[in-house]
Image (cartoon, rainbow, N blue to C red):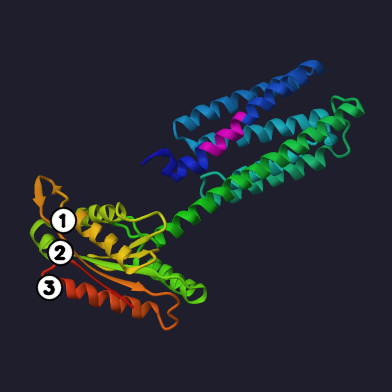
Amino acid sequence: MSNLDNKDYQRYYIQSNLVYFGAIAMHILLGIFFAVLRSNEAFMANLVALSVAVYAVYLNREYRYAFASFIYILTTSIVVSFQIVVFGMEAGLFYYYLNMSMLIIFTNWKNSQKLLGIAIVAMLAMTMHQFVYFQTPMVVLDRNIIHLWHHFNLILNMFAIGHSAYFFMKIADEAEERLTIQAKTDFVTGVKNRGALMMTLDHEIEHHVHLGGGFGVIMGDIDHFKRINDTYGHITGDYVLARISQLLIDCLRETDVIGRYGGEEFLMICHVKDLNTLLTIAQRMRENIAKHDFEFQGEKLSITMSFGAVYVKYKDENITSEKVIDLVDQQMYVSKSNGRNMVTAIES
């Protein structure tokens, strides 16, 4: 499984690494800030937090996502608590407790561990608030500096929380899109499944009835497909279905639609202007399959396909999906009855 398809990689590696690398950059800036303030205690605490962030990146590379997030959140919470004691309430350090709670939600911990972690962070935040509210900070900073630092912490944490939420919403949207595609796609061939195909045909007919313009429908059935499954097995049958779907696609334009209608039946909806053009496409499909050398696991297969085609004339208000399917199925049956490997087409 590739990294792009691995949900753990998407959820925990990429996002948490962004958090850790962001923390590394922040701690480097804070290290300079504490050095200028000559606050050795805050500088050393910040150095510990920086080291843990670097170590968390290493743990992520070893796929130890849970432990990486645990030591990062634990260390950050402790260092923040210490810095609140040193610099007081007005530095805006309390925002980091909210950030840690958000990160806990997005870890791959068990749900019970997440609830416990959030409860501990909440208790720590309330305890620190009660402890320092009436206390004088160990280091009293200039009002302009403390306000600047407060705004820095506020903006940083708002950005971090917003980015995490956006990242996971994006993953959720992508997952929903993949599920939607899968729900409309035939697993074996990769083309539309019957449900999606019929929705497309209904839409085409609605467009046709209201705006006019003809269109064509082709149904193709693999000749003696049951014999292939019985003789060579269903794996070979799946190979044939997948290969034929690609050969059919090669004969279509970008605006045309193809799907697997049934077991060995394919349905194509073609945007053409007349019956002759539709017949030409169907014949091209038949020839493309008949001349193709099918070979699977050393077995050479001779395969043909029978087609039925119906051209729906300009603004036929009596046409329905059921009628189109019935008509094209009848034409395909004629092709089967007349010896297979042929095309029969009519105009509705």
Three-letter code for the amino acid on which mark 1 is drawn: Ala
Question: Seen in the image, is 103 located left or right of residue 257?
Answer: right
Instruction: Give the image quarter of residue 180.
Output: bottom left
Residue type at mark 2 is Asn
Mark earlier in primary sequence (3, 1): 1
Looking at the image, can residue 201 be seen?
yes
Q: Is residue 17 magenta?
A: yes
State the residue position of label 2: 341
- Label 3 is placed on what type of residue? Asn
Front-most of residues 186 and 303: 303
Give the answer, above or below, for where 219 lies relative to 322.
Answer: above
229 magenta-colored: no
Secondary structure at badge 1 equals helix
Where residue 276 appears, as percent x and y from the top left, is 30, 66
Please report contact status of discs 1 and 2: CB closer than 8 Å, yes or no: yes
Q: Which residue is mark 1?
A: 290
For residue 264, above or below residue 242: below
